[in-house]
Image (cartoon, rainbow, N blue to C red):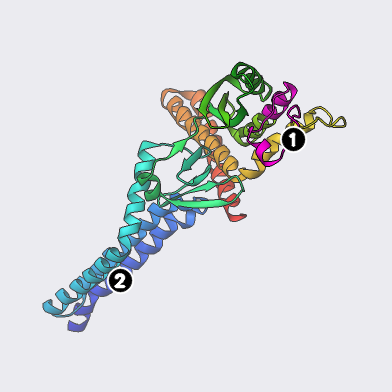
Amino acid sequence: MEILALWLPLVITLSFGTVMIIAVRWILLRRAQELTSEQRLPRQMVVFVIILVLLIAVALTLPVSESSRNQLLALIGVLVSGVLAFSSTTIVANLMSGLVIRFNKPFKTGDFIRCNDYFGRVSEKGLLDTEIQTEQRDLIHIANSYLVNNPVSVIRSSGTLITANISIGYDVHHTSVTEALTKAVLEAGLEEGYVQVSELGDFSVSYRVAGLLKEVKSVLTARSNLHKAILDTLHNSDIEIMSPNFIAQRPTEATQKFIAKVPTNVPSKTRASVEDDDAQEAIAFDKAELAAQHEESLRDAKAKVESVRQQISEAKGADKTALEKELEGALSQVDNILKLEQQTKETE
């Protein structure tokens, strides 16, 4: 009986703790397989804390002397402190930076961002790092602490300026260049274009042309189209795109101009070619675009759930029953979006 009395608290603690851990894991993790890794992290932290509490409880119920129990607790404390000391410097910094990004919301999934040498479209935001998709379709994971400690430029969803720089010789008046470049902005499909004289060099004048692009998803195509339009309008206006010091490297006739001739067999831009241009961003930023669509759909679905719940609280009778069915459909839509997002990540 004395032995049973000594070991009974430990057996009860282990049994209760094991059942609790299994139940918590099943409730928080097993039943929520569709959750993303970011959404599962807080639940995993809860399970870890419960396991840590169980270890302390086991140490307190061991049938040993008071001094041995204190030494065991001290050992557990040293082990936990050591693990945190070795890992917390980076992990905690990124975790806190992730919380800062969540609260401040400097950008959202689908936004184009630039941080020093990194440029791409945000495809996923995590607690420890942020994933962006580059123009080459590559995925880059940037630590959140890096984003917090360095300036981040975000392309606004309301529009961005597409710019290009070009040098023209002093023999061409700036009004002629400005007129041609302004026309190029319009032909590139940009709005509110303007031209600036950015520099007076030793051999040429540098111009900066810019136009507003309201559909920021096509930023790559818009930049390419602006460059094409600049080539066409300047050449059609009989303006050379070259510096006069080119003559010192390859002597030519003074009246000769280096202007690319338009091929006679090149067809005009068709609808198919326009769609091909649009497909450039679809290929380069496919994951980021899909993530942005999922986030927007999930946000709309959750807003609908809250709206229906508000209506249910005020409805009565048959209206309330109909709203409850609508709520079930809205919740099912949220679950389907989460499952689709998880399936997309598993197939990458």
What stretch of residues is rendered in magenta? Answer: 229-257
Q: Residues within 10 Å of mark 2 (few under 14, many from 20)?
A: some
Q: Nearer the viewer, residue 204 or 157?
A: 204
Give the residue displayed 53% in from the left and 31% down from the top. Answer: 201
Report the Cα–Cα distance between label 1 and label 2.
93 Å
Q: Nearer the viewer, residue 98 or 255?
A: 255
For residue 213, above or below residue 339:
above
Magenta residue check for 240: yes
Q: Nearer the viewer, residue 119 or 345?
A: 119
Q: Position of residue 321 (x, y in %)?
A: 51, 29
Q: Provide the secondary structure element on which disc 1 rests.
A: loop
Give the residue displayed 35% in from the left and 51% down from the top. Answer: 95
For residue 138, above or below residue 262:
below
Q: Quadrant of residue 77?
A: bottom left
Q: Which residue is mark 1?
A: 252
Check disc 2 and give the amino acid type. Leu
Q: Which residue is mark 2?
A: 14
Q: Residues within 10 Å of mark 1 (few under 14, many from 20)?
A: few
Give the residue displayed 55% in from the left and 39% down from the top. Answer: 292
